Image (cartoon, helix red, strand yellow):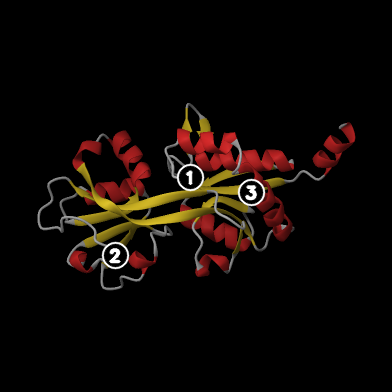
Amino acid sequence: MALLLAAVVSRADVLRVGLGDLDYPPFYFTKQGELQGAAIEVAEALAGQLGHQLNYERLPFVRVQRHLASGDLDMVVLYFRTPEREESALYLQQPHLQESSFMVVKKGLQGIPAGYRGSFLEWRDQRFLSVRGYYHGETFRQALFLDKQLVINEQELIRRTLSGGRFVGVGNRAALQYHAERMGVADQLQYIEPAIDRGDDYIAFSRKTPKAEQYVAEFSEALRSFKRSRRYAEIIRRYGLDH
């Protein structure tokens, strides 16, 4: 056992992990000075099993993506998989979490469709807001006829959605609700049902990180085992996520 432990410690690496500068619950957020969330718990469990240490750097999300592409960051723990992102990132062989994107408007806003029916044609007269660098599914991405405006974070998205300019925000409902509650405006928002996208979240490594392929293989194997564990099921249940 001692020899095995020494072998694990000897190959332990410190990995630089990028996180958005604003909390993104239930996936990552700070509570009482401690970094928490479903993505954090899964990543820490896998790293601990493999003997690696994760050092987190919180940056605007666009900078996280830029630093991942350049190799200034080794890893991200919550990343949608797209062809564009695969040019600079290597993904684990399966997702570890799932999340949903919703439209949100100012409560009582008149002249909008009653709901979402799988197409944005009914919504073409609205102005949309989304956080720069975030992905909300192919249907939204390919709706080029929409007036889409990018914002720097969820707080700006919420402020502009409530500004009276007939804006429709797009984002993760739990994250938007968290920031709206902290801003004291949660009761002014209305979420449009159903979700416009439900997507898989991955852990990914920078293609420029030394041993990136090795990390992907190690973490992928560890994840396969971890997703069958009671601990993983408890994380999913506690944060109210789909298994």
The residue at the point 30 percent across, 51 percent down is 157
Q: Secondary structure at mark 3?
A: helix
Number of numbered discs on residues: 3
Q: Position of residue 13 (x, y in %)?
A: 74, 46
The label nearer to you, 2 versus 3, is: 3
Left or right of 142? Residue 38 is right
In terms of sequence position, does the residue under pointer 3 or pointer 1 come before the other? 3
Q: Position of residue 138 (x, y in %)?
A: 39, 66
How many residues crowd mark 1 within 10 Å: few (<14), some (14–19), many (20+)?
few
Foreground disc of the pair 1, 2: 1
Could you say which is closer to the camera, residue 223 or residue 31?
Answer: 223
CA distance separating discs 3 and 1? 14 Å
User: Is residue 49 visible in this depiction of the protein?
Assistant: yes
Residue at mark 1: 243
| Amino acid type, callout 1 | His
Q: Quadrant for the N terminus, please.
A: top right
Residue under label 3, please give it. 224
In this picture, is 31 found above or below 48? above
Amino acid type, residue under disc 3 in the picture: Arg
Whole-number angstrom distance, CA of label 1 to CA of label 2 = 32 Å
Instruction: Identify residue for label 2.
Output: 148
Mark found first going from the N terminus, 2 or 3: 2
Residue in the image at 58% along x and 55% along y:
94
Of residue 57 and residue 141, the one placed in the foreground of this image is 141
Task: Give me the residue at 81% from left, 41% from top.
Answer: 8
* Mark 3 Cα-neighbour bin, 10 Å: few <14, some 14–19, many ≥20: some
Local SS, label 1: loop
Residue type at the position of mark 2: Lys
**Disc 2 to disc 3, how far (Cα)?**
38 Å
Residue 69 to residue 26: above or below: below
Q: Nearer the viewer, residue 210 or 197?
A: 197
Image side of residue 53 versus residue 100, left or right: right
